[in-house]
Image (cartoon, helix red, strand yellow):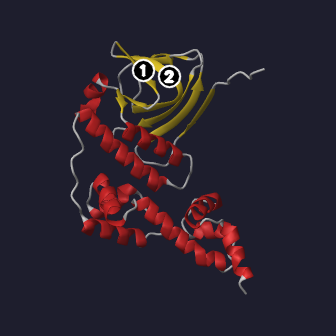
Amino acid sequence: MVAPVVEQVRAWRPRVPGIAEVFHARFIGHVYPMHAHDSWTLLIVDDGAVRYDLDRHEHGVLGSVVSLLPPHVPHNGQAATEHGFRKRVLYLDHAGLSEAMIGRAVDTPTFTDPLLHRRVRRLHAVLDHPGDELEAASRLTLIHDRLRDLLRGTDPQPRHADPGLAHRLRHLLDSRIVEGLSLTEAAAVLHADPTHLIRAFSREFGMPPHQYLISRRVDHARPLLLSGMPARDVAAASGFHDQPHLTRHFKRILGTTPGQYARSADSTG
């Protein structure tokens, strides 16, 4: 006997500027009445399909389609199949997308754009892990950048190399390895647009700023582990959110856990 599918909801407010709420849901019979939000609604559907009415026009979301519902514009929503749907939603504030774009989003609220869909999926994956707020903010900035290009109906403009900016950002990150900094802080200190900041750094060093910072934190943790400091204390001393946060990135970079790495020192004496 096949177990019935249970409707599920999970919502939280991440510590990422620009994201008011993250909302994951599995619905079968629920039907949204006409309603409106004060924020932008960025929606992807992982399973099934959703149909909704916006400004008296019907739209649908499934597969690799991304939907952007503008603030203050009423819409409804329901499953487009009897099996329901599983969706992930980001409610975004007005900082990244101006109200001038609301009319364009009403006219074109859905995008079949693999790059945008991939960026949204990756951001959701990062938001599941507390401590990776710099990476989440960086990924959100690139999503804003892509949405603005799509809403304007233009191809992204070429960005010129800026190695000086990239090196200034690296110096700033090196000075804040443990305490860290937000993308907004870095942009303010360096008087640069966040998107340009990320692109300049990635072009110059072959990795985004958040990845560089994590690698430096792992380097900071290594001698502490070898000195015998407990992993939970090493995590705090190296700028990680907690021990699981340290373990996940340490293993991803070095191929072993902090505990195994620390114990290896005992076998070399």
Crowd around label 2: few <14 · some 14–19 · many ≥20 (10 Å): many
Q: Name the quadrant of the N terminus.
A: top right
> Tag 1: residue type?
Gly
> Residue 81 appears in which quarter of the rendering?
top right
The residue that label 2 is drawn on is 49
> Tag 2: residue type?
Ala
The residue lying at 66 percent from left, 80 percent from top is 227
Could you say where residue 102 lies in the image, as x and y percent from the top left?
A: 28, 28
Q: Name the quadrant of the C terminus.
A: bottom right
The residue lying at 23 percent from left, 34 percent from top is 152
Q: Which is more toward the observer, 92 or 258?
A: 258
Could you say where residue 82 lies in the image, as x and y percent from the top left?
A: 58, 14
The residue that label 1 is drawn on is 60
> Residue 207 appears in which quarter of the rendering?
bottom left
Residues at discs 1 and 2 in contact (Cβ within 8 Å)? yes
Crowd around label 1: few <14 · some 14–19 · many ≥20 (10 Å): some
Could you say where residue 104 lies in the image, as x and y percent from the top left?
A: 26, 27
Residue 103 tag number: none
34 over 228 or under it: above or below: above
Q: How many marks?
A: 2
Q: Which is more toward the observer, 76 or 13?
A: 76
